[in-house]
């Protein structure tokens, strides 16, 4: 357990504080972490996950909220990454944070809440004067959820929320919440909470305030939460994945304590959907996805499709409204651990225990490329929708994507995907003859689009184009759990809850941005198309407005 670092890279001795890409150098701007003491209160280790939340200004017609009055929030971009830390000893001082808000840090302050109990005498921070506007990092470590100011260089979080009965293991923030409840928190016990992020910031205590409680004490499902996600444009609907292979659909507007029961699952190997018998029930539906754990869930930007990956090694893509399996495909070995959509909804990334990154096409309903470069399990993948493609010396337009991956080998890898270069591998082209496939015979993998609703076995690796990473950089000492791209930086998080912010080339001069710039810079992914046109003007790289790190 590493204590809070006192120098820029004290958490990671011997690691470089920068890495190079064709666009320039990414530099370690600052780090976030939690006090080492927090781990002593753990009820069992949980991998740290990281979410970015952007709170807009409160509506002008809304009175200043109090801990008992819900307030509205918005703006967000989250990704499955992981961690942060809490608490400044017993002290009192006033300072201005990176979001431009004056706040007071006071010792030994405790107030009532909806669950949990305070630990020790570590301080809570009075934030009752927050309007909430700004960019925040939300992460879990042990039995505590931490909230940190993204635009402050202070390593310590500004807020910690303690859970006394179980550990928080996953969370999600809603970009378009129509009321104050914009943050979901899933626990190891299976319990789920929805709360207002702004309200938590305003309350000086270390417990959740004004929380809505779902699946209380695991009455509906007592297996571990493995993922929570708001349905994009779903008017308050959200889904929760569990370690027993079930996924539940909830409506935020309904009472979370209403009685709800579902029929026994007859065949654990088959996908099935059951709806609640009563219109008052919450959850409203149960999807049985697979045998074994659902490891990650991800919605397409428009909310039309839901991707899941699981212990059985399959990616599954569903039409969410029709409750229909569109297609699925298997890893080359072992479980799949993570998945992510391109912002145009055309491609899906997966990573897992085969140490590979796979690219799947929604149009073809199959794997179209795989990448080799990690030396251990791939634990996080993400497209960089803020990256600007360099000019090419070709003619016409090509579609190009930039994405990143992190793994338990402590490395961040950066990849470029040029779709016009994704072709079926060939072994040779004899003079006067036709080229032959690398397998020596025609590959059925490329014959036709896979039929709707089928799970495909993994094709021969020789029949699928191979990608090599553009950059590989060891960014942490501990195994990594996730990464997130923002307009100005790339964030990496390790399983132990240490976060690093790597500033993009050209952004290193300013170490902080004001809250209005931060909120504007982090528009929701649906407003930033990932598909990039490369026009033929010059062959040299120009300075992009945003770049991915690896």
Image (cartoon, grey):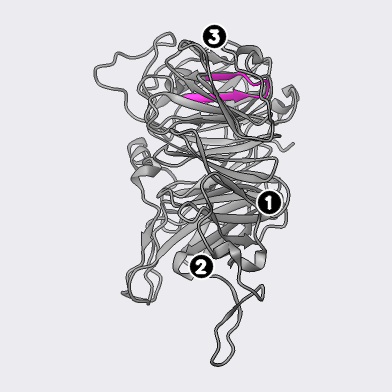
221 or 470: nearer the eye? 221
41 inside magenta stretch = no
The residue pinned by badge 3 equals 257
User: Which circle, 2 or 1, is nearer the viewer?
Assistant: 2
Is disc 1 surrounded by few (<14), some (14 to 19) or many (20+) residues within 10 Å? Answer: many
In the displayed structure, 122 sits above or below 242; it is above
Is disc 2 surrounded by few (<14), some (14 to 19) or many (20+) residues within 10 Å? Answer: some
Distance between the Cα atoms at labels 1 and 3? 42 Å
Residues shaded magenta = 183-193
User: Which circle, 1 or 3, is nearer the viewer?
Assistant: 3
Q: Earlier in the sequence, mark 1 or mark 3?
A: 3
Quarter of the image that includes the C terminus? bottom right
Query: In terms of image quadrants, where is residue 14?
Result: bottom right
Q: Earlier in the sequence, mark 2 or mark 1?
A: 1
* Residue occupying image coordinates x 43% and y 62%: 400
Asked if residue 500 can be seen in this view, the reply is no
Asked if residue 324 can be seen in this view, the reply is yes
Q: Secondary structure at mark 1?
A: loop
Secondary structure mainly formed by the magenta segment: strand
From the top left corner, tell me how far across and down residue 295 is, in percent: 64, 37
191 inside magenta stretch = yes
The residue pinned by badge 1 equals 410
* Residue occupying image coordinates x 66% and y 76%: 440
In the displayed structure, 442 sits above or below 298; it is below
Q: Using the image, tell me which numbered label, if any, was put on residue 223.
A: none
Is disc 3 surrounded by few (<14), some (14 to 19) or many (20+) residues within 10 Å? Answer: some
Q: Using the image, tell me which numbered label, if any, was put on residue 422.
A: 2
From the top left corner, tell me how far across and down residue 510 is, in percent: 41, 49
């Amino acid at each position: 357990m590493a204590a809070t670092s006192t120098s820029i890279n004290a958490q990671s001795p011997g690691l470089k504080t920068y890495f190079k890409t064709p666009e320039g150098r990414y530099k370690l701007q600052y780090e976030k972490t939690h006090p080492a003491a927090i781990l002593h209160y753990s009820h069992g280790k949980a991998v740290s996950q990281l979410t970015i939340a952007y709170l807009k200004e409160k509506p002008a017609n809304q009175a200043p909220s109090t801990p008992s009055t819900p307030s509205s929030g918005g703006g967000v971009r989250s990704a499955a990454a992981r961690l942060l830390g809490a608490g400044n000893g017993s002290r009192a001082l006033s300072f201005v944070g990176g979001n431009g808000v004056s706040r007071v840090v006071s010792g030994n302050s405790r107030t009532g809440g909806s669950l949990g109990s305070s630990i020790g005498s570590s301080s809570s921070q009075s934030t009752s004067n927050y309007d909430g506007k700004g960019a925040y990092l939300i992460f879990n470590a042990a039995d505590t959820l931490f909230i940190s100011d993204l635009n402050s260089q202070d390593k310590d979080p500004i807020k910690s929320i303690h859970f006394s009965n179980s550990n928080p293991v996953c969370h999600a923030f809603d970009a378009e919440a129509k009321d104050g409840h914009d943050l979901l928190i899933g626990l190891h016990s299976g319990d789920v909470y929805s709360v207002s992020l702004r309200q938590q910031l305003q309350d000086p205590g270390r417990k959740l305030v004004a929380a809505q409680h779902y699946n209380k004490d695991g009455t509906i499902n007592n297996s571990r939460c493995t993922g929570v996600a708001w349905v994009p444009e779903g008017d308050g609907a959200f889904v929760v994945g569990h370690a027993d292979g079930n996924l539940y659909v909830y409506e935020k507007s309904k009472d979370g304590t209403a009685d709800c029961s579902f029929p026994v699952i007859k065949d654990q190997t088959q996908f099935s959907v059951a709806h609640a018998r009563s219109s008052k029930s919450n959850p409203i539906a149960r999807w049985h996805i697979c045998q074994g754990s659902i490891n990650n869930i991800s919605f397409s930007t428009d909310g039309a499709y839901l991707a899941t990956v699981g212990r059985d090694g399959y990616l599954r893509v569903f039409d969410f409204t029709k409750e229909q399996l569109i297609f699925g495909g298997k890893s080359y070995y072992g479980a799949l651990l993570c998945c992510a959509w391109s912002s145009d909804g055309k491609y899906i990334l997966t990573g897992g225990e085969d140490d590979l990154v796979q690219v799947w096409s929604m149009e073809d309903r199959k794997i179209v490329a795989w990448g080799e470069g990690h030396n251990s399990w791939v634990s996080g993948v993400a497209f960089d929708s803020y990256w600007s493609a360099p000019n090419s010396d070709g003619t016409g337009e090509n579609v190009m994507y930039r994405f990143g991956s992190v793994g338990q080998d402590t490395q961040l890898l950066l990849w470029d995907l040029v779709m016009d270069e994704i072709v079926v591998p060939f072994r040779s082209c004899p003079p006067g003859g036709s080229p032959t496939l690398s397998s020596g015979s025609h590959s059925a993998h490329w014959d036709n689009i896979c039929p709707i609703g089928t799970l495909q076995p993994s094709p021969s690796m020789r029949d699928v184009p191979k990608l090599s990473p553009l950059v590989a950089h060891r960014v942490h000492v501990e195994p990594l759990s996730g990464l997130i791209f923002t307009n100005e930086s790339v964030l990496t998080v390790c399983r132990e809850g240490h976060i690093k912010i790597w500033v993009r080339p050209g952004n290193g001069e300013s170490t902080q941005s004001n809250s209005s710039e931060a909120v504007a810079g982090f528009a929701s992914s649906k407003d930033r198309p990932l598909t990039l046109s490369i026009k033929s003007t010059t062959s040299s790289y120009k300075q992009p407005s945003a770049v991915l790190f690896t």
